[in-house]
Image (cartoon, rainbow, N blue to C red):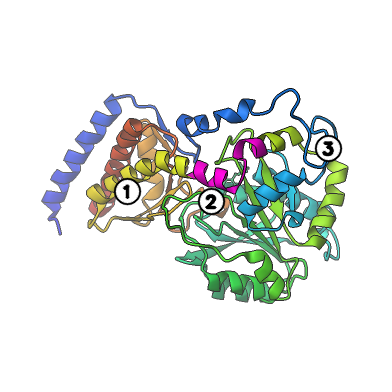
């Protein structure tokens, strides 16, 4: 509602505040969803919870030695809870679920999946559906392997299923879809039961179509009354597509991102196929780390209690970011943002055409954000409006400063566009 003169004056004020920020020579990083030091400290006992004489799994396996391609029984039993799967449906990997996803797609390209007529790399084209905004590293794997990415819109309860269903029914080159079904990176949404059922039941032209169900944040709640996600494994089975889904998770943001445990769940057919492939790749994963995690967690209640301690540390950071967004940008019609109930991110939407400039301005004044566009395939946000905010890593005092600068940059760039 401002007159042009008032807008000019407002712009001059904002520019002055921005220069003041620049003079502070800040060096703050809000670019990646990493746990902070206090969160890592919660798992300090993991480092010495095994003794010299404690190296045997429940089935007598000496965890110091080779073997155990799919994990030790007690780790499979405990960690299958995170995936909402049965112990026999899971394979325990190394320290990174992204690694499992990358290798699985590479295997499909090199060798094909159980129902593939030929390795995917021999096909003229391979395509993946990428609900967006989504996780940049999923998109990077596709780009790296030459898999064409098709952008699909996200709605409040999952991908636009009308769009998904019509695409997969028509094109046999579409071999899969990326999904972060709970506290999605970056939008924080949870897929509704209806969306899970449609994904499980939809006819696909490719017989070897797969859902890459990255359940990275399944136990990462910020409230005491979390929403539930429909279990996709039995839902696919009941819909007559038992082999459709590969589900992934890890303890990266439960214990240590650099030294956690990754896991994968799927149908018996997929698991048997994958075990054969894994046997060529490795003689077995780090079973001592599995045993260590079992001793440290003890049981499901141990994981739940730890996740509550994580929430107690990071919830105030989410609240701070949300409070600053609300008090500085609320009601101004220049931005909207997610209010996640879990996970690691807040998704900020600016006016179209502003996100790149806002991120560049923040960086020029010392605050590193995730590059604008990163949440879209090929780094191209069609409306240039989405910015991923990662509140967990910086201490509260730094986070406050960083967010004060972010909201200032949002106002500054939006005003510039209004004046242009
Ligand atoms: N999947 C999602 C959705 C993530 O946000 C992340 C990390 O931010 C990962 C996977 C990485 O998982 P990992 O550490 O197990 O490789």
Query: Can residue 304 be found in the magenta stretch?
Result: yes
Left or right, 96 with respect to 283, comes to left
Look at discs 1 and 3 and give the one toward the viewer: 3
Which comes sooner in the sequence, label 1 or label 2?
Answer: 2
Q: Are marks 1 and 2 in contact (CB under 8 Å)?
A: no
Query: In which image quadrant can residue 418 be found?
Result: bottom left
Question: Of tags 3 and 2, which is closer to the observer?
Answer: 3
Q: Are marks 1 and 3 in contact (CB under 8 Å)?
A: no
Q: Residue at x 72, y 61 (%)?
A: 126
- Dot 1: within a 10 Å radius of its alpha carbon, few (fewer than 14), some, or many (20 or more) residues? some
Does residue 338 show up? yes
> Which residue: 70% across, 38% down?
290
Q: Which residues are magenta?
A: 293-307
Quadrant containing ligand 1 reads top right
Task: Tell me the element at label 3.
Answer: loop
Determine which residue is flagged by label 2.
219
Can residue 144 be seen by looking at this rendering?
no
């Amino acid at each position: 509602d401002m007159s042009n003169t008032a807008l000019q004056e407002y712009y001059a004020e904002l520019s002055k505040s921005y220069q003041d920020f620049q003079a502070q020579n800040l060096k703050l990083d809000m670019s990646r969803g990493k746990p902070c030091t206090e969160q890592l400290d919660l798992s300090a006992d993991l480092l010495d919870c095994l003794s010299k004489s404690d190296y045997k799994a429940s089935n007598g396996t000496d965890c110091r030695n080779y073997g155990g391609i799919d994990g030790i029984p007690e780790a499979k039993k405990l960690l299958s809870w995170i995936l909402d799967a049965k112990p026999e449906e899971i394979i325990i990997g190394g320290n990174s679920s992204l690694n499992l996803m990358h290798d699985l797609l590479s295997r499909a390209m090199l060798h094909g999946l159980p129902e593939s007529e030929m390795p995917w790399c021999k096909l003229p084209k391979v395509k993946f559906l990428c609900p967006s905004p989504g996780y940049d590293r999923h998109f990077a794997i596709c780009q790296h392997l030459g898999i064409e990415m098709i952008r699909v819109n996200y709605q409040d309860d999952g991908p636009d299923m009308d769009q998904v269903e019509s695409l997969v029914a028509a094109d046999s080159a579409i071999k899969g879809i990326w999904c972060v079904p709970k506290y999605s990176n970056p939008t924080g949404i949870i897929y509704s039961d209806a969306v899970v059922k449609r994904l499980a039941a939809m006819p696909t032209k490719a017989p070897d179509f797969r859902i890459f169900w990255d359940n990275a944040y399944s136990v990462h709640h910020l409230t005491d009354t979390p929403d539930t996600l429909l279990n996709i494994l039995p839902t696919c089975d009941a819909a007559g597509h038992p082999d459709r889904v590969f589900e992934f998770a890890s303890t990266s943001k439960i214990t240590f991102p650099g030294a956690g445990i990754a896991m994968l769940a799927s149908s018996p057919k997929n698991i048997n196929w994958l075990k054969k492939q894994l046997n060529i790749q490795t003689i077995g994963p780090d079973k001592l780390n599995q045993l260590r995690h079992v001793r440290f967690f003890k049981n499901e209640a141990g994981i739940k209690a730890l996740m509550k301690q994580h929430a107690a540390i990071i919830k105030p950071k989410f609240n701070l970011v949300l409070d600053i967004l609300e008090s500085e940008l609320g009601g101004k019609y220049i931005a909207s943002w997610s209010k996640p109930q879990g996970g690691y991110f807040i998704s900020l939407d600016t006016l179209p055409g502003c996100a790149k400039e806002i991120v560049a301005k923040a960086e020029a004044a010392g605050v590193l954000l995730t590059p604008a566009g990163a949440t879209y395939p090929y780094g191209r946000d069609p409306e240039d409006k989405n910015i991923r905010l990662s509140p967990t890593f910086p201490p509260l005092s730094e986070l406050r400063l960083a967010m004060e600068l972010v909201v200032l940059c949002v106002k500054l760039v939006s005003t510039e566009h209004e004046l242009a």
